[in-house]
């Protein structure tokens, strides 16, 4: 006869945590014919193989979660980098004078019209340091020199001094 408390609960049901309940299930796995486990309300046996498999599944799940977290973090970093670049470009654009803004807008309109008609786009401006085409881009400049990037500007200043 299975022992029950005054409320009719079996020891398995009365166990507070999963580890205690698993001990009942492990015992059932070791001695399957010793007691009437159905009356004791123990659901199924727990073998070492089953426990090992459960641990492997948990480890695999944790590994997948870590990988997904790293991917989300990587995507967030890439998104932040794009936002930062856009913000820099916006600040640079806002720092331009009205005359420079109008010239840049006119240059962009001209390029758009040339692309629509299918003509080759002419080179409107080049970087003073590396000579690359800066048409349609906001240049970095000091004095009368225009550069495609801060790197070219820095190189020019280093050579000049």
Image (cartoon, rainbow, N blue to C red):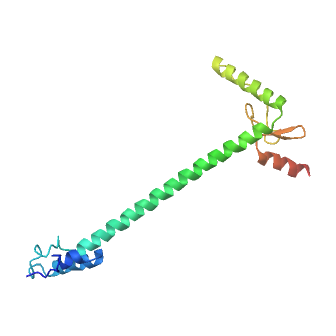
Residue 138: image location, x then y, percent: 76, 36
Whether residue 139 is visible to the viewer of this picture, yes or no, is no
In this rendered view, identify the residue nearer to me: 153 or 43: 43
Q: Residue furthest top?
A: 117
Which residue occupies the foreground of this view, 122 or 96? 96
Q: Nearer the viewer, residue 4 or 158?
A: 4
Residue 65's image quarter? bottom left
Residue located 64% across and 45% down the image: 83
Q: Is residue 43 above or below residue 92?
A: below
The one nearer the camera, 47 or 27, is 27
* Residue reaching furthest to the right: 161
- Where's residue 121, x and y in %? 70, 24
| Image quadrant in which the N terminus is located | bottom left
Name the quadrant containing residue 129.
top right
Q: Could you tell me if residue 126 is visible in this image?
A: yes
116 displayed left or right of 51: right
Q: Residue at x 53, y 55 (%)?
A: 73
- Which residue is painted at 65% across and 22% down in the image? 115
Q: How far across and down, in percent of the image, does residue 153 sit?
A: 82, 46
């Amino acid at each position: 006869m299975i022992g029950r408390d005054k409320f009719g609960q079996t020891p398995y049901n009365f166990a507070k945590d999963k580890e205690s309940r698993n001990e009942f299930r492990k015992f059932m796995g070791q001695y399957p014919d010793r007691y009437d486990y159905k009356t004791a309300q123990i659901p199924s046996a727990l073998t070492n193989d089953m426990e090992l498999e459960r641990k492997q599944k948990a480890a695999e799940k944790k590994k997948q979660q870590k990988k997904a977290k790293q991917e989300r973090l990587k995507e967030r970093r890439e998104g932040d980098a794009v936002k930062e670049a856009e913000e820099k470009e916006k600040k640079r654009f806002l720092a331009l004078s009205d005359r420079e803004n109008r010239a840049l807008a006119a240059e962009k309109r001209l390029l758009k019209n040339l692309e629509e008609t299918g003509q080759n786009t002419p080179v409107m401006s080049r970087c003073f340091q590396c000579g690359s085409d800066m048409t349609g881009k906001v240049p970095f400049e000091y004095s009368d020199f225009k550069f495609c990037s801060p790197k070219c500007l820095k190189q020019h200043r280093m050579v000049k001094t």
